[in-house]
Image (cartoon, rainbow, N blue to C red):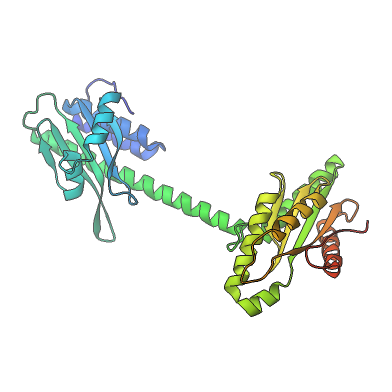
Amino acid sequence: MAEFDLERPDPLTALVVGAAALARESDLDEALGTLVGAVVASVGATSAAITLQDPDRPEPELTFTIGIDAAGQTALAAAVADSGHPLTEAARDRHEVTAGETSAYPLIVGRDGIEQALGAIAFVWPDGGALAEADAVTLRATANLVAVAVDRSRLASTIAERSEWFERLAHTDPLTGLANIRTFSRVLELELARAGRQGSEVSVALFDVDDFAATNDDAGREAGDDVLRSVASVLAGAVRLVDTVARFGGDEFIVVAPGSAGLTVARRVAEGIAALPEIDGRRISVSAGVARFPVDGADKESIIAAAQAAVDRARTEGRGSVEATQG
């Protein structure tokens, strides 16, 4: 955890330096190290510690210390589990707590007119004497700055998580978790371009769930969704790491397989799906068609059309059939 070894600044300078670090430093621990370290030095404290409350976990978590060795950090992390510890009490009851050598202050922010306690910060004094009012003012200001910094960091993390979620949503099928058609189309274009440059092959395998419309009509949409998720699970487990599997349509799936292994992949998938347990008394199977670049087409559209033609031939052969193109 953070250390601070500058000469003792006056409290105002400590707050100014710390506020500047919070405004400019992207790493929260580094910024807190500058602020809290400067304040510890300015008021003559021996150490400081911060506990935070995770919204998903009610127990306080020791997240930051200055002037406490590893053994002391371990002991303090266990001690804050006690509801009577100054750090825990300050955060829970949202008021300042002084006990012996320790002075603790809640970290509070307001949102939509409601105050929220994020945790607490505590400072330890060498003699446990009465805290001068000027020092208390400095420590309250420090607690407010820390609260704002922690809140801002959490908001930034939430925004990043939401952005990542929306990005993932834009590239995946919500029912199966596989890539969607938009992602598949882009991957296929890239793989065809790479294969064209290197003089290699790309296989495309298209899978159509047999009698899916009848399953939906007779057993209901939930049963149909269960079939699609089961097929997607087999596909995801059967393809190679270099392959890309996507949901291609209502009851169709497609795999981009660099090289000439598409037929092998398709047969492995068909066998795995045939081994699935029945859903609502119905056996699950797929008809599959495989096309290869460049022998079956020179672009994305012609390769997909060739795979579709192979699927059509597979359907005429019966459930669970796998057909390659005629090329």
Front residue of this view, candidates 136 and 50: 50
Residue drawn at x 77%, y 51% as measured from the top left: 265
- The x, y position of residue 21, in whole percent, is 34, 35
Tell me, yes or no, if residue 17 can be seen here: no
Front residue of this view, candidates 106 and 136: 106
- The x, y position of residue 120, in whole percent, is 23, 42
Horizontal side, residue 152 vs residue 164: left or right: left
Q: Quadrant of residue 195?
A: top right
Q: Quadrant of residue 180?
A: bottom right
Q: Is residue 81 above or below residue 233?
A: above
Residue drawn at x 73%, y 64% as measured from the top left: 285
Q: Seen from this angle, which residue lies furthest left? A: 130
Quadrant of the snapshot with the C terminus? bottom right
Quadrant of the snapshot with the N terminus? top left
Front residue of this view, candidates 15 and 159: 159
Q: Is residue 34 above or below residue 257?
A: above
Residue drawn at x 10%, y 36% as measured from the top left: 99
Front residue of this view, candidates 240 and 120: 240
Horizontal side, residue 210 vs residue 58: left or right: right
Q: Quadrant of residue 196?
A: top right
Q: Is residue 62 above or below residue 235?
A: above
Tell me, yes or no, if residue 87 can be seen here: yes
